[in-house]
Image (cartoon, rainbow, N blue to C red):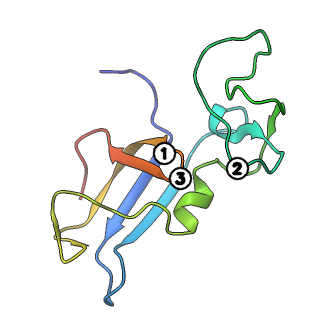
Amino acid sequence: MSTETHIHYVTVAASETDGPAYVTFVCLADPTARCRNYPDCGCEVWDEDGEDDGTNDPWKHTHPSVPQPKCWLQEWFANEGTDYEGEDTLDGQPTRPHHGPIEAYFEGDYVSWSFIEKETN
């Protein structure tokens, strides 16, 4: 198990309407964290491959990473781009609330994420 401090948390609760479940995202990272330092170019795609090409830019993009006010995941969660698809859904709603740290991955056209530890209710 990693000793890394978790910085991304999600809370999931059933919707009070027929809409998708409520998914709330919080990033606890400080301004120097990797998730808050990324290209500010408006390009649709930039990859994080973890290899050093001599630019010291973890995103491997032609435009340099710069400090940002928000985590790169925030917009995905704010725009409902990260629906909850847990195993405990019934008609698209979670059968119980969830809260905990997450791992997230950019999949090209969307972000996938999952809880990484035992969740707390």
Of tags 2 and 1, the one toward the viewer is: 2
Where, by quadrant of the figure, is residue 16 drawn? bottom left
**Residue type (three-letter) at the residue carrying disc 1:** His
Residue 19 location in percent, x, y?
36, 84
Q: Residue 111: percent from the left, percent from the top?
A: 48, 50
Sequence order check: which comes first, mark 3 or mark 2?
2
Residue 24 is situated, as x and y percent measured from the top left of the image, at 46, 64
The residue located at (16%, 70%) in the rendering is: 95
Q: Which mark is residue 44?
A: 2
Q: Residue furthest bottom?
A: 17
Closer to the N terminus: mark 3 or mark 1? 1
How many tags in the picture?
Answer: 3
Does label 2 or label 1 sit earlier along the sequence?
Answer: 1
User: Residue at horizontal 19%, vertical 78%?
Assistant: 91
Q: As shown in the figure, which amino acid type bears the numbered disc 2?
A: Glu
Please name whichever residue, 42 or 26, is drawn nearer the observer in this view of the structure: 42
Drawn side of residue 26 relative to residue 29, left or right: left
Residue 8's tag is 1
Q: Secondary structure at mark 3?
A: loop
Q: Residue, x 62% and y 33% (percent of image)?
A: 47
